[in-house]
Amino acid sequence: MHTPRAFHLRGGASLTLAVLLLTSTQALAELPTVTITVADPTAAELGLETGALTLTRSGGNLAAALSVGIGRGGGASNGADYAFVSSQIPIPANETSVTVLVTPLADNLAEGDEQVTLTIQPQLDYETGSTRSRAT
């Protein structure tokens, strides 16, 4: 660490700055990249057929769990038209992917097809894959 240095400002005020240089034998940790893909594109109330999306991470520290922020959208309502999907999905430690099920809730209403769109939300713990950060 450098010796703090004082700077004198007009009117007698002073400002002291210290610069701390950190040295380490370890390189900065690589951030994982997270992508989302459609594993099963069809979900249906009739027969309660589930759809599925897969969150995959590559790089980074695989020994640590990773919580991925998820945006939910589309014409179907989270928790009303399909079973609640959290806004944070964990990828467990030592795993490279997790499957997110989209389970329709039978409401006995005559309605047309509805979409569920899940989007990876940016966070400081990971980078989003450039080609697949959204799945419908």
Image (cartoon, rainbow, N blue to C red):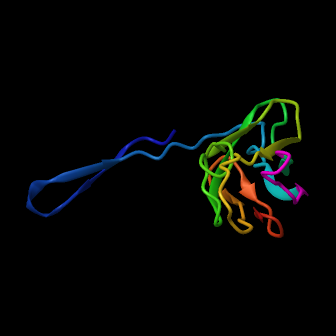
Q: Residue at x 47, y 47 (%)?
A: 19
Q: Position of residue 71 (x, y in %)?
A: 62, 56
The secondary structure that dominates the magenta segment is loop
Q: Quadrant of the C terminus?
A: bottom right
Q: Residue at x 89, y 41 (%)?
A: 96
Name the foreground residue: 64 vs 21.
64
Question: What residue span does the magenta drawing correspond to?
Answer: 39-48
Residue 56 visible at all: no
Q: Residue at x 82, y 45 (%)?
A: 48
Relative side of 64 to 79, left or right: right
Q: Quadrant of residue 37?
A: bottom right
Image height of 116 relative to 67, above or below: below
Image height of 83 relative to 130, above or below: above
Q: Looking at this rendering, what residue extends furthest in the left direction?
A: 11
Q: Position of residue 29 (x, y in %)?
A: 75, 43
Image height of 130 relative to 59, above or below: below
- Asked if the stretch drawn in magenta spans residue 42, the answer is yes
Q: Position of residue 125 (x, y in %)?
A: 67, 46
Q: Quadrant of residue 4?
A: top left
Residue 38 visible at all: yes
